[in-house]
Image: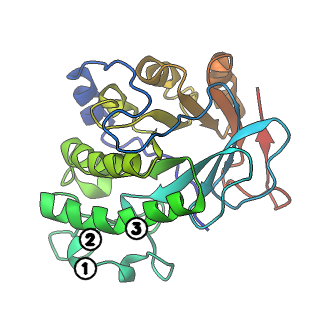
């Protein structure tokens, strides 16, 4: 089971400077740069975030995001969660031991760089050769999503380059070069591709092959980023909040985009701590 990951705010100044240097691209939908047709999630639709474990979607839900280890919800639009920029935890499937050691980012002393919030090793996407090798493994996971009948991808940890522990060894340019490989491949499999968080790079969404946004905590009063996602993606956005204050702000856009509040652990319905609210 994969837990959600609240994005960090480290190195934010770097990201904002990059955002200021790019021009917002026009919204691109359909089959651009693909060999197979794909459909975007219906806009302003009932949404449920189930990456912590699948359960029967509540009434009114049309779009669901689930971990790739789960199956799609019958009759709904299904987004497949893939941890694309980091490994899983040690001891889990796709943990560091399941990866070529040469593809893990390392500190100057040779130790593997670990995201302390999630205890996950960070993948080294700093060269074209490494990006291609890592992408080849992730493509296998994308194949699983397509074979199961998912409609779209949620490629998590696009913002890994902003982590303090990375110490700027991975850059926004590396992240974008890598995600272009995955988004292009996803399109060939008939999957729409979502940008997860990383508002600093939202203006580059078209160039990066990203079709819609999945944004956690954009309504949080500390960030107030929801408008930036709407500016870049129009109504093709899904907002997920974990606090009442964030939900209040995100609901300002509920007439245009999908908005849901979940518990911070994204627990399955019936489990301790489960929470799901709509505007």
Q: Residue at x 66, y 25 (%)?
A: 44
Q: Residues within 10 Å of mark 2 (few under 14, many from 20)?
A: many
Which color scheme does this rendered protein use?
A: rainbow
Point out the tag, 3 or 1, that comes first from the N-terminus. 1
Task: Find residue 22 and report its image quarter.
Answer: top left
Q: In the structure shown, which secondary structural element does the residue marked by tag 3 occupy?
A: helix
Q: In the structure shown, which secondary structural element does the residue marked by tag 1 occupy?
A: helix
Q: Between residues 160 and 10, which one lies in front from this camera angle?
A: 160
> Mark 2 and mark 1 in contact (Cβ < 8 Å)?
yes
Disc nearest the viewer among 3 and 1: 3
- Work out whether residue 163 can be spotted: no
Q: Between residues 43 and 95, which one lies in front from this camera angle?
A: 43
Residue matched to label 2:
104
* Percent position of residue 234, x then y: 49, 19
* Percent position of residue 211, x then y: 43, 34
Q: Which mark is residue 140?
A: 3
* Percent position of residue 144, x then y: 50, 65
Q: Between residues 59 and 163, which one lies in front from this camera angle?
A: 59
Residue matched to label 1:
101
Q: Residue at x 72, y 32 (%)?
A: 244
How much space separates mark 3 and mark 2, taking CA atoms?
18 Å
How much space separates mark 1 and mark 2, taking CA atoms?
6 Å
Q: Residue at x 51, y 29 (%)?
A: 222
* Percent position of residue 149, x then y: 59, 56
Disc nearest the viewer among 3 and 2: 3
Task: Find residue 203 and report its image quarter.
Answer: top left
């Amino acid at each position: 089971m994969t837990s959600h990951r609240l994005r960090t705010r480290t190195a934010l100044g770097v990201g904002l400077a990059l955002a200021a240097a790019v021009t917002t691209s026009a919204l691109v939908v359909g089959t651009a740069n693909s060999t197979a047709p794909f459909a975007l999630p219906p806009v302003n639709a009932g949404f449920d975030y189930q990456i912590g474990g699948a359960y029967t979607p509540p009434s009114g839900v049309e779009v669901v995001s689930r971990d790739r280890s789960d199956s799609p919800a019958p009759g709904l639009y299904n987004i497949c969660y893939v941890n694309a920029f980091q490994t899983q935890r040690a001891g889990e499937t796709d943990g560091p031991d399941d990866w070529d050691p040469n593809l893990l980012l390392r500190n100057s002393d040779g130790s593997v760089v670990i995201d302390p919030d999630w205890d996950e090793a960070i993948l080294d996407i700093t060269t074209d050769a490494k990006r291609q090798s890592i992408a080849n493994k992730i493509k296998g996971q994308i194949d699983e999503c397509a074979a199961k009948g998912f409609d779209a991808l949620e490629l998590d940890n696009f913002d890994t380059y902003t982590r303090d522990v990375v110490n700027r060894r991975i850059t926004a340019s590396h992240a974008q070069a890598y995600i272009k490989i995955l988004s292009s491949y996803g399109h060939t499999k008939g999957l729409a591709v979502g940008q997860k968080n990383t508002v600093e790079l939202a203006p580059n969404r078209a160039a990066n092959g990203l079709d819609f946004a999945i944004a956690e905590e954009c309504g949080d009063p500390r960030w107030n980023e929801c408008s930036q996602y709407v500016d870049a993606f129009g109504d093709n956005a899904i907002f997920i909040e974990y606090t009442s204050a964030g939900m209040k702000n995100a609901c300002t856009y509920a007439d245009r985009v999908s908005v849901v509040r979940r518990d911070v652990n994204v627990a399955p319905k019936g489990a301790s701590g489960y929470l799901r609210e709509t505007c």
